[in-house]
Amino acid sequence: MPHAFVSSINKNIKPFSDGDLTLIGFFDARKYSLAFVQMRGLKFALTIKQKEGRFLVKPEKITRPSDLNLTKEAIALFCKNCCGEILSSNLALKKIKPKSPKLLDPLYFCKHPEFFDGEVSVEVGFGSGRHLLYRAKESPNKKFVGIEIHKPSIEQVLRQCQLQGIDNIYVMDFDARLIMETVKPDSLSEVFVHFPVPWPDSPTRRVISESFLAVCSRALKDGGYVELRSDDRDYFEYAFSSAMSLPKTKVDSTKNEPAEIVSKYEDRWLRKGKDIFEMRIYPQKESKSRPMRESFELGGEISVLRLNSLPKEGMVQEGVLVSFEEVLAAKDGKSFAVKVTFGDVARPDRRYIVCGKEEAYYYPFAPLCVEAGRKAHKIIKEYLYGKNS
Ligand SMILES: C[S@@+](CC[C@H](N)C(=O)[O-])C[C@H]1O[C@@H](n2cnc3c(N)ncnc32)[C@H](O)[C@@H]1O
């Protein structure tokens, strides 16, 4: 991960711009500080932590971008403006910069339903990208959306697209279980889920569930399907019973049927002599429509009293979680950043809420336009501004 160790941090850090970097705010928690930055239009945060007499500057976990070069440049500019001497770092830029227009921001589908004009397929958790790249080359007139949370895989696939001149792959760096809810209804022909992590001890972390399949049924066109390939019999049976919990569905399944293209994980399991199970789930269409665009505006200044009395424990109301994790304060004591986890209990989302003198807003971007996000936003607003907000 890109980082720098520096000898010191300036005492009075104030918002500034230098080249492509803007420092939006600087907040202190008990054991670390956060610098909210914008670099070439992308908002994220840097964590600054004291470690054995020196300071470590690195990307913050929730907001960490997948573009390593951009992150390295941001850390270098932050250190130049706000820190003492750089003692060690790994900030040398990689030669090939992944072109980022193909990396869509997580709110993209909420804002651009026209993206789904024409044929579109999705692959969830593409890993090394073998299957995604193969499909995109086979069908150059179709769009392929890859949704992945593993940043090195994202960088690798973007780089391959650039090297191989593939321009019909679009990548999203986010939890696919949430993104799928933002896909325009009746628009996908396939959703590929190949060798998902089986999570035997915590099934709620699995990609496939009854609610994921219900969301897919809304996003798929008539005749569209979810394709699961897995070496894990338990997961396979779990997916089957999730499919059977839908009001109406058709499932085709096979065992050890060779794939058109063998993914990295399939290759690994085949070499170990494991059985490979495939299932195509054709969920019944669910025609309930819901708003795709949403305003997640907060309001004006939030009183310090309210911020100090936010509940310390997370709460769940009708399956929706809201947990105010921490309140960080700016040096001037007038603006704050609240770390909040919210949304569906099984797949919560995380953001910061920047509370300034005149306004409060979600950072680095608003919640996705999904049902649980909407409900959580209402609860968050009530806590920040009171019941009649
Ligand atoms: C075991 S790997 C399989 C990769 C690839 N499909 C293959 O067959 O080689 C599972 C991938 O799913 C990704 N993943 C897990 N949960 C995810 C989620 N909720 N949203 C998007 N990607 C996810 C992981 O980061 C990982 O790259």
Image (tube, rainbow, N blue to C red):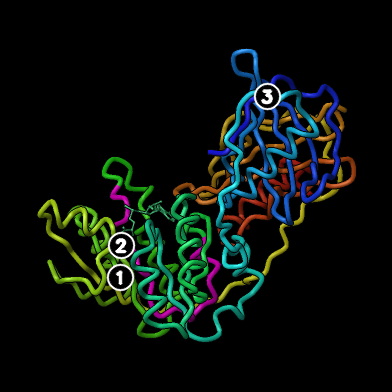
In the image, the residue with mark 1 has its CB under 8 Å from the nearest atom of ligand 1: no
Residue 388 percent location from the top left of the image: 79, 49
Quadrant of the rendered image containing residue 82: top right
Crowdedness of circle 1 by 10 Å Cα count: few (<14), some, many (20+)?
Answer: many
- 328 is higher (above) or lower (below) than 289: above
* Bounds of the magenta segment: 179-198
Comes first in the chain, label 3 or label 1: 3
Comes first in the chain, label 2 or label 3: 3
Q: Which residue is mark 2?
A: 194
Crowdedness of circle 2 by 10 Å Cα count: few (<14), some, many (20+)?
Answer: many
Residue under the image location 41 percent in, 76 percent down? 136
Q: Nearer the viewer, mark 3 or mark 1?
A: 3
Residue 346 percent location from the top left of the image: 44, 48
Q: Which residue is mark 3?
A: 6
Q: CA distance from mark 3 to mark 1?
A: 48 Å
- 308 is higher (above) or lower (below) than 251: above
